[in-house]
Image (cartoon, rainbow, N blue to C red):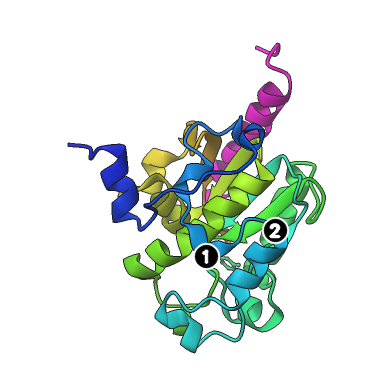
Amino acid sequence: MSLPREDRLKALGLWPVWRLRDASQTASLATPAEAVATDIGDSWDALRSAVQSCTRCELSKTRTQGVFGVGDIAADWMIIGEAPGADEDRLGEPFVGQAGKLLDAMLAALGLKRGEDVYIANVLKSRPPGNRDPKPEEVQACLPYLLRQIDLIRPKLILAMGRFAAQSLLVTDTSIARMRGRLHEYHGVPLIVTYHPAYRLRNPADKAKSWEDLCLARQTMARLKDPGLS
Ligand code: URA
């Protein structure tokens, strides 16, 4: 049985809701800007400093720095991963380790380059120590930042990298196998699920499936940009 929307937002720590002052900014988001608590800054710079000084969860005690995100803040594409690892925690940028190299290759397959028409962020902005799995309360504490980033960027398409990111965003425990290959929606933004690059590095045999996901993403973006395409 699904909970009423208000209850779901409360369960995610996203209630009371926040509304953008300029309603036109939320025009493309069906259930939008509302879904963010009030204390996290409403401009990009305020949001970035809120992440840097955030103490909403225990991870603030062990991280080197908050990893806000990187890229074009007017991007059509948004890539969402799980959480910073050791390299990201040290350098302050998402996906800079081995997985990041593969992500850059995946972006190239989409005709994209880090920083150009793509914004890269994570569900968690702070590194879980020892790269342990994020805890539900950490996701709950951190999601408002990502939601606000999505609100401000208003991407045309989100690519969720890996089971954890997809399950956190879609609030489900469905397997990645079942989430791949179709179009989802996150706060009004179309979303496609694919394997995490770190998983891909461990499972090279799944390259073909990952390629299928990228083809679906590319076709979806083409349709979003030109709805006349069949
Ligand atoms: N894995 C992620 O999900 N995000 C990063 O930033 C790095 C590795």
Which secondary structure lies at badge 1?
helix
> What residue sits 73% from the left and 25% below the top?
225
Of residue 158 and residue 201, the one placed in the foreground of this image is 158
Above or below, comparing residue 218 to residue 171 in the picture? above
Q: Nearer the viewer, mark 2 or mark 1?
A: 2
Please indicate whether residue 15 sits to the left or right of residue 226 in the image: left
Quadrant of the snapshot with the C terminus: top right
Q: Say what secondary structure mark 2 lies in.
A: helix
> Is residue 162 magenta-colored?
no
Q: Residue at x 41, y 82 (%)?
A: 58
> Which residue lies under the disc numbered 1?
202
For residue 69, which quarter of the picture? bottom right
Q: CA distance from mark 2 to mark 1?
A: 35 Å
Q: Position of residue 155 (x, y in %)?
A: 66, 40
Q: Which residue is mark 2?
A: 44
Where does the magenta region start and end?
206-230
Q: Position of residue 95 (x, y in %)?
A: 65, 66
Q: Is residue 229 above or below residue 12?
A: above
Above or below — where is 205 with respect to 75?
A: below
Amino acid type, residue under disc 2 in the picture: Trp
